Image (cartoon, rainbow, N blue to C red):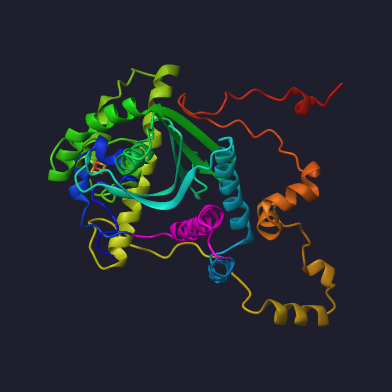
Amino acid sequence: MPGTHALLSASAAERWINCPPSARLTEKMPDTESPYAAEGTLAHSLAELKVRKKFDKMRKSEFDKRLAEIRKDPLYAPEMDGHTDTYLDYILKIAHGYNKVAPYVVAEKRLDYSAYAPGGFGTCDCVMLCKNDLHIFDFKYGKGVPVSAEENPQLKLYALGALAEYGFLYDIQSVTLHIIQPRLDSINDFLISTDALTAWGNSIRPIAELADKGEGEFKSGDWCRFCKAKATCRKRTEDFFALECSINMPKELLSDSEIGEALARAQTLKNWVTDLEEYALNAILSGTDISGWKAVEGRSNRKITDIDGAFEVLTKEGYDESLLYERKPITLTELEKLVTKKKLEELIGSMIVKPQGKPTLAPESDKRKPYKPNLEEMFGGK
Ligand code: SF4
């Protein structure tokens, strides 16, 4: 649909702020929506419906009709109800924190921040205003990595849009940015004053103007993961090769500090190689020649085309049915899908434990605490 996405979108803000020319470079590249994105869109519709029912006084018949439509979608799973309830409960908790004053709450609000970024607008999952406070809520349905609300540019752009829209009705002094990722059990927030927010908006205005004109310096980094040019970008490629040459190789063996440096570089190289492989395979499959490469058939496993028919033959031959089937419990994730997270907690929460995870390597910047072995788990209590 034309006009549904801004060139300088809020969700891509980290990318275009760091690499301004990426906005125009990728402007006409096709979008590829994964099934996960479609699932996220459906979860957002459900979340919006629940917020609107609570705060918009939506008629029950309309709510029921829309809920039934969502539940008919093949991507719907009962766990989606549990996760959207977590989101709604969190918004309600903040709303109830305002004693005797009912906040103004609006879901899926289109906000215009073009005063800071040319043509900039975006749709915020939920906006709440009360007294001198503005709250910006962002519901993320992915199962990837927890996203921090701290100085989050996407949410700050929404907040600037909300200030422009409601600033003359409310004397907004402070802004809280909230990110709710129920599938990762992650909810975090960040408080910022309107002065600091506006100062940030002013600081990115010249960058946004460069991005709008397709000017500025290309700069590679973490944000390349979400760039449509991530496989074909010359700057990203040059930076990877530059990295390889810049490693100060010692004569014989690497020191521990060099191992740390090489590991940090290898992590980003791994992602880059995957991006290149995906790009080349897709190109070859659609008839483009990628010099020195071809597509071949990958490994496949044998399978029985008619399990019931095959097992009937085997049981008639005298093989006991109990030997042909494995009986094993479904996983906790599957149970949550079946029963919903909330109900499962009520029913068997006391029987669910989370053993300590195996030690895994992570960069220093990782938000998780350093690993400490649980001695009681290892050797048992006294
Ligand atoms: S891949 Fe990275 S460096 Fe290249 S245009 Fe995109 S964001 Fe910029």
The answer to which quarter of the image holds residue 158 is top left
- The image position of residue 11, as x and y in percent, is 35, 46
State which region is magenta.
32-59
How far across and down, in percent of the image, does residue 135 sit?
45, 38
Which residue lies at the image location 36% right of the left edge and 31% below the top edge?
265
Q: Does the magenta stretch include residue 314?
A: no
Task: In the rendered view, tell whether residue 348 sits above or below residue 248.
Answer: below
Depicted 277 relative to depicted 270: above or below:
below
The image shows residue 235 at horizontal and vertical percentages of: 20, 39
Q: Which residue is drawn at 58% across and 70% down?
A: 61
**In the drawing, does residue 276 fall left or right of residue 65?**
left
Q: In which quarter of the image is the N terminus?
A: bottom left
Res 255 seen here: no
* Quadrant position of the C terminus in the picture: top right
Decide if residue 78 is on the left or right side of residue 257.
right
83 and 261: which is toward the camera: 83
Count of marks overlaid on the render: 0
Taking depth in this image into account, of 351 and 341 the one nearest to the observer is: 341
The residue drawn where x is 53% and y is 44% is 181
| Residue 161 visible in the picture | yes
